[in-house]
Image: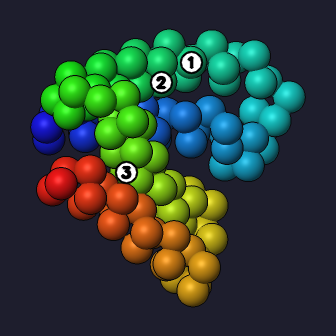
Amino acid sequence: MLKAVLIFVMGTTFAFLQNNMQFINPSLKDKALIVALIFSIPTSLCYIYSYGYFVNQFESAWSGKFMLFGISYMVSPMLIYIFLGESPFNLKTALCMLLSLMIVTIQFKL
């Protein structure tokens, strides 16, 4: 399970970088095709392998989808903070992160 989570976190990081590279490095703003080519294959492979693992583990596509959604919403605020300097420590983001943790816990424990 840990391996699948780590692979998914890598995929989420690649997707984040693909979408936000124009803000992280403004010189890449007009190079969307290059950024997409660099990140699209590793992102897709990470998502395919981690989703497949979760669906097989829980024997449910819904469980796999909810697990990955919950994990991504716990990872994304940290990436936004690290790379873009926007604080995740406000009420709205904190509550969403808490709800995501609850989704993952429900899918894992029930």
How is colour applied across the structure in the image?
Answer: rainbow
Amino acid type at image mark 1: Ser
Tell me which label, 3 or 2, sits earlier in the chain: 2
Determine the residue positioned at 62% across, 33% down.
18
Could you say which quadrant of the image residue 65 lies in?
A: top left
Q: Which mark is residue 75?
A: none
Tell me whether the residue at label 1 lies in contact with that at label 2, contact meaning CB atoms closer than 8 angstroms.
Answer: yes
Could you say which quadrant of the image residue 2 lies in?
A: top left
Q: Is residue 12 above or below residue 41?
A: below
Determine the residue positioned at 13% across, 37% down.
1
Could you say which quadrant of the image residue 52 lies in?
A: top left
Amino acid type at image mark 2: Thr
Can residue 75 be seen from the camera position used here? no
Residue that lies at the very extreme toward the right in this rendered image: 30
Q: Circle 3 sits in a helix, a strand or a loop, which is it?
A: helix
The residue labelled by disc 1 is 40
Q: Quadrant of the C terminus?
A: bottom left
Circle 2 packing at 10 Å, graded few (<14), some (14-19), many (20+), is: many
Q: Is residue 78 above or below residue 110?
A: below
22 displayed left or right of 105: right
Circle 1 packing at 10 Å, graded few (<14), some (14-19), many (20+), is: some
Mark 3 and mark 1: span between their CA atoms? 20 Å
The residue labelled by disc 3 is 71
Q: Circle 2 sits in a helix, a strand or a loop, which is it?
A: helix
Determine the residue positioned at 70% across, 17% down.
34
Nearer the observer: mark 3 or 2; the answer is 3
Q: Nearer the viewer, residue 93 or 65?
A: 65
The residue labelled by disc 2 is 43
Give x and y (percent) for residue 41: 50, 13
Amino acid type at image mark 3: Ile
Give x and y (percent) for residue 79: 49, 56
